[in-house]
Amino acid sequence: MEFVFDYLSFLAKTVTIVIAVAFVISIAQSVSNRRQYGGGGHLDVRNVGDEIRHLQRSVQEAQMSPGQMKKLYKADAKALKARESGKAEPETKKGRVYVLRFRGDMDASSVSNLRREVTAVIASAQPDDEVVCEIESAGGYVHSYGLAASQLHRITSAGLKLTAVVDKVAASGGYLMAVVADRILAAPFAIIGSIGVAAEIPNVHRLLKKHDIDFEVMTAGEYKRTLTVFGENTDSARQKFQDDLEDTHTLFQEYVSEHRPSLDIATVATGETWYGQRAVDRGLVDELMTSDEYYSNRAEATDVYRVKWVVHRNPLERAMGQVQQGMAKIARRLGATD
């Protein structure tokens, strides 16, 4: 029995050492990748058209007999040989479509990736090319989404056509980004709108006072602090805070009106959201269409490329990222991001 315990103890130590070594190697690899690619990541570019054709081919092959598949493979080999020798007829496709994807949280943290993707596309795109941005966000902090919208504005400022595609939700800050585009497409039940501003601040002043706890707020400047969590809020502070919200809402409306002047801003800037068809009726969206349908249509005449900045993370960073994603899902289910 003692032998068994000794063996288990040895095995536990061995496993611990192996895990520790693997962790160190993983971190070293992560550092190496950061040095190799710079900025802790690299740009991944994939041909969406090839992915679509692969799916089509898989269905076709499943319906063929062995003889038909043999003929198909021979034809493929002959076409490949012709392309490699330069004897094949040149493709008639014109222009390219670059696809970016933005999935937003409260802080619009994906903007750090978006700016690199936008820089790469602008540097390589031609005047006739198109950029598509898939937007999925229920909004968040004003300054964060203002920066995200500014990144998309770089595309139109460079003279490139920009299309926004919304499969699920583009509300509040998400819609602030979408209006930069020349055209907005949305799935039939995508959530659109929420042109409004909200702020929620708890106040525990009475609780502290009940337990004889003083909380002092020292400021220099009349409006350095308005509403506070721990101090006693005044009517004048509340009014100033409300004035700031109204001004932010005005800026939001002005930005939307600038990019979509045909909108009746008074009727849509109420903070409400609408599903796809209702959003089309109100002019918030131009057409009902999912991203998959749009790419399939465009891939027939153009080359469609998905451009993505991939961040290199060590195991600890990946674990923390998974924890954050889990917490974000719980928060969305509780309605905390509304």
Image (tube, rainbow, N blue to C red):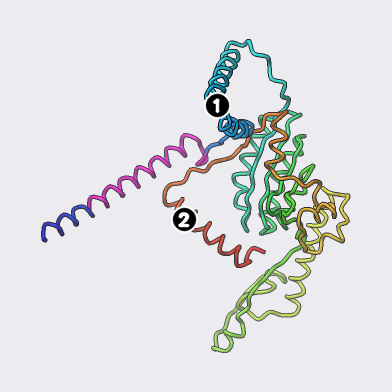
Q: Which residue occupies the foreground of this view, 65 or 183?
A: 65
In the rendering, which numbered label is found on residue 320?
2
Q: Main secondary structure of the magenta part?
A: helix
Q: Are marks 1 and 2 in contact (CB under 8 Å)?
A: no
In the image, taking residue 67 as reference, residue 287 lies left or right, namely right
Q: Which residue is mark 1?
A: 65
Q: Which residue occupies the foreground of this view, 274 or 138?
A: 274
Marks 1 and 2, how far apart at CA: 50 Å
Q: Secondary structure at mark 1?
A: loop
Residue 18 vs 274, above or below: the answer is above
Residue at 33%, 45% (x, y): give it: 22
In the image, taking residue 81 as reference, residue 251 lies left or right, namely right
Query: Within the image, what quadrant is residue 155 found in?
Result: top right
Residue 175 vs 100, above or below: the answer is below
Sequence order check, earlier mark of 1 and 2: 1
Residue 299 vs 179, above or below: the answer is above
In the rendering, which numbered label is found on residue 317?
none
Residue at 57%, 40% (x, y): give it: 309
Q: Position of residue 148 (x, y in %)?
A: 68, 49
Q: Position of residue 109 (x, y in %)?
A: 60, 52
Residue 55 within the segment the image draws in magenta: no
Residue farthest left in this picture: 2
Q: Secondary structure at mark 2?
A: helix
In the image, taking residue 253 as reference, residue 12 lies left or right, namely left
Residue range of the region highlighted in magenta in the rendering: 13-41
Residue 31 vs 266, above or below: the answer is above
**Which marked residue is nearer to the observer: mark 1 or mark 2?**
1
Residue 26 within the segment the image draws in magenta: yes
Query: Within the image, what quadrant is residue 131 found in?
Result: top right
Name the quarter where the N terminus is drawn.
bottom left
Kind of residue at badge 2? Met
